Amino acid sequence: QKEVEQNSGPLSVPEGAIASLNCTYSDRVSQSFFWYRQYSGKSPELIMSIYSNGDKEDGRFTAQLNKASQYVSLLIRDSQPSDSATYLCAVKNMDSSYKLIFGSGTRLLVRP
Amino acid sequence: NAGVTQTPKFQVLKTGQSMTLQCAQDMNHNSMYWYRQDPGMGLRLIYYSASEGTTDKGEVPNGYNVSRLNKREFSLRLESAAPSQTSVYFCASSEAEGNYGYTFGSGTRLTVV
């Protein structure tokens, strides 16, 4: 079982809709969770981090964490064509010497 | 601008040639990392350096060596390039502990023919 799993997509949503990206992880001692956005041909860019159960909002982005279910998600409200990218979920825990473990990413396509 | 700088941005090598990818960060981070990214494979850790003076293997270290030259610089060397090493390489840095993510460099696109 992969440590961090994401649906590869593509997830296609119309402009203005809510895009919901999901990630599950296998290690219960995971302590920090991150979402990166990666445009084609570019490097990953950190957009959200979350450490505690519940929701964390930043502008149009909301990260949701449920440690009991080992599940983290990213909601993008009012999706724009410029949000079209691959979104990488990453997990950090002490057992991995604080290394980030990345999922393979979900490609999001926002249709105008 | 503060961040992680990688050189070169593009490189074509012939099989068997060697080269060194350079990475430098100016954020005073303790930890540095080298990843490769291949289609459908996500980011895979090659080597990392938790702090100056230490290096450790990651998930896919075969065919690579690294040097943590000082706190700022972490280089990746391919001694004898193979077509299987065709990939995009990213360097990243972070604080080792605590709830910090990574900052990535802009990447090196390497093709081995």
Image: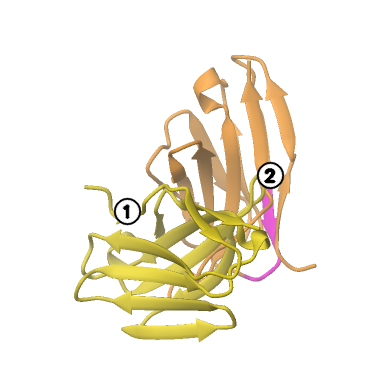
Chain colours: A yellow, B orange
Q: Nearer the viewer, mark 1 or mark 2?
A: 1
In the rendered image, residue B24 lying in the magenta stretch gets the answer: yes
Q: Is residue B93 above or below residue A51?
A: above
Height in image: A21 above or below B100?
above
Give the image location of residue B35, x and y in percent. Answer: 51, 46
**Is A54 placed left or right of B3 in the picture?**
left
Q: What kind of element bears circle 2?
A: strand
Q: Could you tell me how far apart the alpha carbons at marks 1 and 2 are, in whole angstroms?
A: 31 Å
Q: Is residue B79 visible?
A: yes
Instruction: Tell me which residue sits at (40%, 37%) in the image.
Output: B60
Disc number for residue A5:
1
SS at badge 1 = strand
Q: Residues within 10 Å of mark 2 (few under 14, many from 20)?
A: some
Q: In the picture, residue B29 is in which quadrant?
A: bottom right
Chain to which the residue tagged by mark 2 belongs: B
Q: Which mark is residue B45?
A: none
Q: Nearer the viewer, residue A94 or A30?
A: A30
Instruction: Count up the numbered dots.
Output: 2
Find residue B25 and report its image quarter.
bottom right
Question: Which quarter shows the N terminus of chain B?
Answer: bottom right
What is the x, y in percent for residue B75?
A: 62, 45
Magenta stretch holds residue B113? no
Of residues A108 and B113, the one drawn nearer to the viewer in this rendering: A108
> Which residue position holds label 2?
B22
- Magenta segment, which residues? B23-28
Whether marks 1 and 2 lie on the same chain: no
- Residue at point 50%, 54% (across, down): A12
Q: Residue furthest right?
A: B1
Q: Is residue B65 above or below residue B102?
A: above
Q: The disc labelled 1 sits on which kind of residue?
A: Glu
